[in-house]
Amino acid sequence: MFLPKKKYSQKYLDELFEKDFNKAFLDFKKIYYNKKFPNQAREVLIEMIFQLGTNNLKKFKKFNKFINKKLFYLAALEMMDSLWYLQTPDRVDGLIKTLLGNNND
């Protein structure tokens, strides 16, 4: 928990990020342990876990069905059809471009 107006050292923030990222990576390995995804799909899934948390990612039932079948276009459509997309459209659009291998803006 961060306190308002308190200054945090860069070292502390870097360590906190590393801890959170490592947790997201380990959760990715637990959820998708037997899947051989391309790098861009792994990157998107780890970022989704990092941002949304494991439990919230699991609520994306259709998305997970499509991602597990490697139907990335259909998974991307499910990303767009979510409250998450309405809340952070630029971030989700970026992840969709990455997922579909179209991230060369």
Image: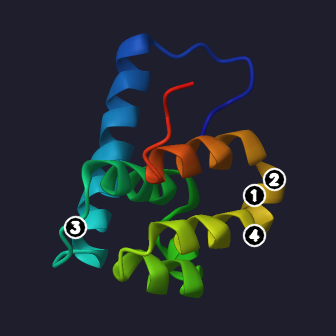
Q: Gap in Å between the C-alphas at discs 1 and 3?
A: 24 Å
Q: Which residue is mark 2?
A: 87
Question: The disc labelled 2 sits on which kind of residue?
Answer: Gln
Q: Gap in Å between the C-alphas at discs 1 and 4?
A: 5 Å
Quadrant including the C terminus: top right
Q: Gap in Å between the C-alphas at discs 3 and 4?
A: 24 Å
Residue closer to the observer: 69 or 57: 69
Q: Gap in Å between the C-alphas at discs 1 and 2?
A: 5 Å
Quadrant including the N terminus: top right
Is label 3 in contact with label 4 (beta carbons under 8 Å)? no
Q: Is residue 38 left or right of residue 96?
A: left
Residue closer to the observer: 36 or 21: 36
| Residue at position x 54%, y 77% in the image | 63
Up-down: is 2 above or below 67?
A: above
Number of dots carrying numbers: 4
Q: Which residue is mark 3?
A: 29
Q: Which residue is mark 4?
A: 82
Is label 1 in contact with label 4 (beta carbons under 8 Å)? yes
Up-down: is 13 above or below 66?
A: above
Q: Is residue 58 left or right of residue 40?
A: right
Question: The disc labelled 4 sits on which kind of residue?
Answer: Ser
Q: How are the residues colored? A: rainbow
